[in-house]
Image: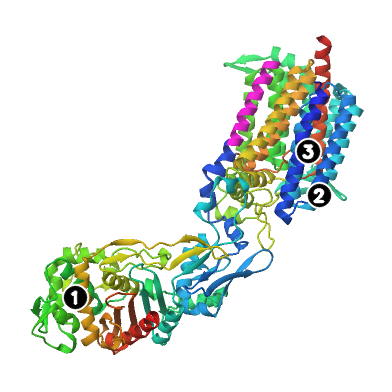
Amino acid sequence: MTERNRELFALIPASLLVTAGFTAVFIQRDDAVSDVSLVYGAVFLALCLAVHIVLRFKLPNADPYLFPLVAVLACFGLVVIYRIDEDLAREQAQWFVVGLAAFAATVVGLGDHRRLERYRYVIALTGIVLLVLPRVPGIGQQVNGAYLGVQLGPVSFQPSELAKIAIVVFLASYLRDTRQMLVQGARRIGGVTLPPIKHLGPLLMVWGLAMLLLVFIRDLGSSLMFFGGFLALIYVATNRLSFAAIGLALFAGGTWFFASTVGHVQDRVATWRDPFDDRLYDQAGGSFQIAQSIFAQADGGLFGEGFGQSLLTTPDGTVLLPVAETDLIYAVITSEVGLFGAVALLCIYLLFVERGFKTALLATDSFSKLLATGLTAVFGLQVFVIVGGVTKLIPLTGVTLPFISYGGSSIVANFILLALLLLISERARAEAKGAR
Amino acid sequence: MNAPIIRLFVVFMVLFAGLVGATSWWTVLAADSARDNPKNQRDLFKSLEVRRGAITSAGGTELARSVEGPGDTFEREYGPEAEAVSHILGYYYPLGIGDAGTERFRADELSGESDDLDTLFEQIAGGTADVGYDVRTSLDLDAQRVAIQQLAGRKGSVVALEPDTGRVQVMASVPGYDPATLEDEDVFTDLSSDEENSPLINRATQSGYPPGSTFKVLTAAAALDSGRFTPDSALDGSSPQTFSATPLSNFGGQSFGSVSLTQALTQSVNTVWAEVGVQLGEETMTEYMEDFGLFEQPPLDYPDTQLFTSGTYLDNELVKPTEQGQDLGRIAIGQAGLLVTPLQMAMITGTVANDGVLMEPRIAREITDRDGRTVDEVEPERVRRVMSEESANQLTAMMREVVQSGSGVAAALEGTNVAGKTGTAEIDIANNINQLWFVAFAPADDPETAIAVTVERAVGGQGGQVAAPIARAVLESLLD
């Protein structure tokens, strides 16, 4: 069976899932099966088919599983958002159309991902500008204490979503050029392999950028995501564990320093360590979110309360589980489909990560390998940061759960990420076939 | 570059394993602690969307029901009948003052949670019950009303039990309250700060009073069942006699000569029963007090916080006579630090009526669904045999004498033999304030009900004059 036919078959369960999901929500809501659930399923299937046709013509050899995995995530997310708020689901569906358009535009317009290398400094600059944009007076927004949003007229978006791709593209390109020098110029001092002084500068700059994010944008999660992606790249590029370890130590040290000196970082850590503390719980932007997230998940148990059954608002309409459609959507999912459903979801993410790394393995040139690794790593780390935050494994910060959380910038950015992975995959697999 | 990529994937697998672990922690391993967290009000809010079951009397009259409230919620409604049964019923205001009484004790059944419904299938199917079960009590609403009328505004309590099942037929406590008014928290605050009348207190289960001469029933049971005495055993009934270095007198200072135990019970001769107590000794008295259920919380289906443990108290501490030397003679006649609830007295009386077997008292009789089908029958539970059937029959004969010819004639019913005992515990001799008691069961040969009546801090009067007529009226209503 060809790659594209496998993909087509894999899409069938995705569309069945969306139909079943909507049906469940309808039954819960109105005690009736509505044909609207079938319409949703059909529209979704049609969109998937459209993308599939684009892939069939433009990327016939690309990985057959990445897109169906995304389709499952997206349709599951749509059902959960629909269950939270019908209007948001309609907007989210529209964002999917935009996201798919961005996906198609990337596949068709870019053609070959290696063209990105030529613009790496422009891309790097764009990434940094995007990151600091939320702190620009007038357009920046503070959400839950972190500066992650930008309001431009009627449109608000989270530039960090796009910035993560830009930064990864730059790092992949930069490390492709310097990796040999980093390895060869390395010296062992006191049993630890250190990169050459000449190249330490740019690396320290990336570290500085991560620290800037932490203090300036006030978001530990994004900071962890970017820096984690960077460490993954430097490790793969040099195969020197010590480089990654030094980076990790620098990051940990910096985080510890700011967590003990900068007020808002201190608060974040305090709410994480003791979410049930009376003072932190009642404080604005305090531990109410994480506490409610835990309570909602505790109701889920092994099998969950069922679609549409989790309590999100009190009977008088006050919000009980805040930001349920974005940051805390994983808590809603756990509450409604339980541990088994949540683990199934994590498995889908892990499968995506596996396909991403597989793509990196198959790629033949360094840039493609590094780009695929970096994109996959930031994607996986994003899942880790938000799910880890919601489950109190790490401090909760506001990043989206890819393809599931409500939000246009997240959808569009992640579809572009998917397009880049598929472009890399197409080239790698076509070459492999040609070689055979 | 491939080896580090594979290792990197292993790192991601470890990270994701951490996520699975954290999710398992909150959904399963630590779920109970999260659910029990006082900040977690999810169950409370969910419960508002449950149509809570009704609480009904034995005859099926709805005492508490749920009606549709704002949005998808339901509100508790208490009808006009509720005031007469306020303490047993309790109240349920989850967004206000909370809950109490049967509303609290039977919360799981009323909100539809039941152990046998927690099947795997229902967990998979998801969702919680949105309709609760009804709780049918064994309350006789008519007799309850009679009890309250008879108390006529005097502070006090009436408890009536079915001896062979322990079912609570009457549990009146005056003054009471109207559960419907407690929705207003200010009313609740006012009532709870009224220390003069303490209307929120269920005097039947929460108030310990000196039982006075009614306690001679327990002393007599110990005397007969231990084999040390018979109803005909003769003792010195002269007055006063010295117990614990203090003179003890009979009622009115009356001196009796050598009298049998039967006569001593009929005439409530203090000096005889005090002597019996002393002769039985601390071990035997304590043993029978424990067997009759003192020194432990009564096994009533009612919240722990609303149950007083009857027994001998020293400086507000429960101390058994065996633990510390006490005035055993005065304990035997229901004085000297002895504090007993009306429920406990009804249990003692019911044990004699039930041929010596103590039953667990029960308010609820059965749990039914909204269509009236029985979901769960509340079965009678036997606590223990306290005394032999023979001793119980002897004591019954002695108690019949009390009503036929002794201090309890005011409780006599036409056509039905009543066995009983009066009590007048002196609380404040200077101001002539007494705790008045009467305990009884009827019919004496085949008891259908055992009753305890008390009137709190009455000025003047005796148990036989004040409490016995109340018991008579309630017995009449119950046996009707």
Magenta-highlighted residues: B1-20
Give the mark, 3 or 2, whose residue is nearer the N terminus. Answer: 3
Residue A267: where, in percent of width, then height? 62, 47
User: What chain letter is assigned to the residue under label 2?
Assistant: A
Q: Nearer the viewer, mark 2 or mark 1?
A: 2
Q: What subunit carries mark 1?
A: B
Instruction: Give the alpha-carbon distance from disc 3 to disc 2, as whole Å.
Output: 15 Å
The residue mark sitting in front, 3 or 2, is 2
Q: Amino acid type of disc 2?
A: Asp
What chain letter is assigned to the residue under label 3?
A
Amino acid found under the numbered disc labelled 3? Ser
Q: Residue furthest top?
A: A436
**In front of the other: A272 or B361:** B361
The span from disc 2 to disc 1 (Cα, nearest Å) is: 82 Å
Q: Residue at x 59, y 34 (%)?
A: B18
Q: Is residue A40 visible?
A: yes
Q: Main secondary structure of the magenta part?
A: helix
Q: Secondary structure at mark 3?
A: helix
Quadrant location of the C terminus of chain B?
bottom left
Residue extending furthest toward the right: A109
In the picture, the disc for residue B330 is 1
> Is residue B17 inside the magenta stretch?
yes
Residue A403 at least partly seen: no
Q: Which residue is mark 3?
A: A15
The quarter of the picture where residue A199 lies is: top right
Task: Give the residue at mark 2.
Answer: A35
Which residue is nearer to you in this view: A364 or B26?
Answer: B26
Q: Residues within 10 Å of mark 3 (few under 14, many from 20)?
A: many
State whether residue A4 is above or below residue B339.
Answer: above
- Residue B143 picture quarter: bottom left
Is residue B50 found inside the magenta-colored segment of the image?
no
Q: Dot 1 lies on which element? A: helix
